[in-house]
Image (cartoon, coloured by chain):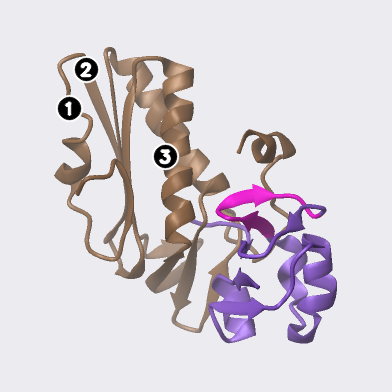
Chain colours: A purple, B brown
């Protein structure tokens, strides 16, 4: 199982902070295009991805127990 | 507060951040205080709401401190960023950098705030008189612009 975290506008669109999915061994790209397709997250392509709190690339493979976070363009400060 | 880099939903006491970097080697402590601005290009902000991926944000703030130590040598950095609802003039972020000489502390402090706007997972939502928007870039013109960290920043992470 993996946990997927959403923030800012993505969180409002999904309607929750966290979604747990029974998958492993998929890439970030698979996660976006297949597993999260139902949420119709138009802005997800502008988001960075972090796996276990480190920025990761589209082809990174997600393992069981990983926490994947979608990081929309940041605006702190 | 035990950490030198932290996210909090409580008001930030400036001295809590400054005292983290006080040390005998320092000849300068530069402090940057980011506050909530009422008007941006004529548009009135009522209040802001900040959200953070707190665990990762604290790690990224700490990385900025490490980058500063690499770039300026003998520098000590502390940063606090607030989340939740902030009213006009409330403090959103406090950065303190101490160095032996003043020039480095000015430069490093500037570097820290610019890096926060690039790599730290914190978002602000503008609440205007006529609506709301999660701000997705620092130009405050549109949200979700293609604005990823450069590739080398990902690799360095």
Which of the image's four quarters has the C terminus of chain B?
Answer: top right
Report in which chain the residue with disc 2 lies. Answer: B
Q: Earlier in the sequence, mark 3 or mark 2?
A: 2
Q: Which residue is mark 3?
A: B62
Q: Which residues are magenta?
A: A48-58
Q: Quadrant of residue B54?
A: bottom left
Q: Quadrant of residue B146?
A: bottom right
The label number, if any, that marks residue B148 in the structure image:
none
Q: Is residue B34 visible?
A: no
- Direction from residue A35 to residue B15 in the image, left or right: left
Most foreground residue, A32 or A48: A32
- As displayed, is residue B107 above or below residue B132? above
x and y, in percent, of residue B143 in the image: 64, 66
Secondary structure beneath label 3: helix
Q: Which residue is mark 1?
A: B22
Label pair 1/2, CB-CB below 8 angstroms: yes
Most foreground residue, B55 or B99: B55
């Amino acid at each position: 199982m993996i946990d997927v975290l959403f923030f800012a506008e993505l969180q409002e669109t999904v309607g929750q902070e966290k979604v747990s999915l029974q998958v492993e061994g998929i890439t970030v790209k698979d996660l976006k295009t297949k597993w999260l397709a139902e949420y119709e997250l138009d802005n997800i392509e502008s988001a960075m991805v972090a796996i276990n709190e480190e920025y990761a690339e589209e082809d990174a493979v997600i393992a069981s127990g990983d926490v994947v976070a979608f990081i929309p363009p940041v605006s702190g400060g | 507060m035990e950490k030198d880099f932290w996210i909090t939903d409580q008001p930030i006491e400036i001295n809590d951040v400054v005292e983290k970097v006080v040390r005998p080697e320092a000849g300068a402590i530069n402090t940057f205080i980011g506050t909530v601005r009422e008007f941006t290009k004529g548009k009135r902000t009522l209040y802001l709401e900040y959200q953070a991926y707190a665990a990762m944000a604290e790690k990224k703030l700490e990385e900025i401190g490490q980058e500063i130590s690499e770039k300026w040598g003998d520098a000590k950095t502390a940063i606090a960023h607030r989340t939740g609802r902030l009213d006009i003039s409330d403090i959103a972020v406090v950065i303190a950098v101490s160095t032996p000489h003043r020039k480095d502390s000015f430069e490093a402090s500037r570097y820290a705030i610019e890096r926060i706007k690039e790599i730290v997972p914190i978002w602000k939502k503008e609440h205007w008189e006529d609506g709301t928007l999660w701000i997705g870039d620092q130009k405050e013109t549109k949200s979700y612009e293609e604005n990823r960290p450069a590739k080398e920043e990902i690799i360095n992470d």
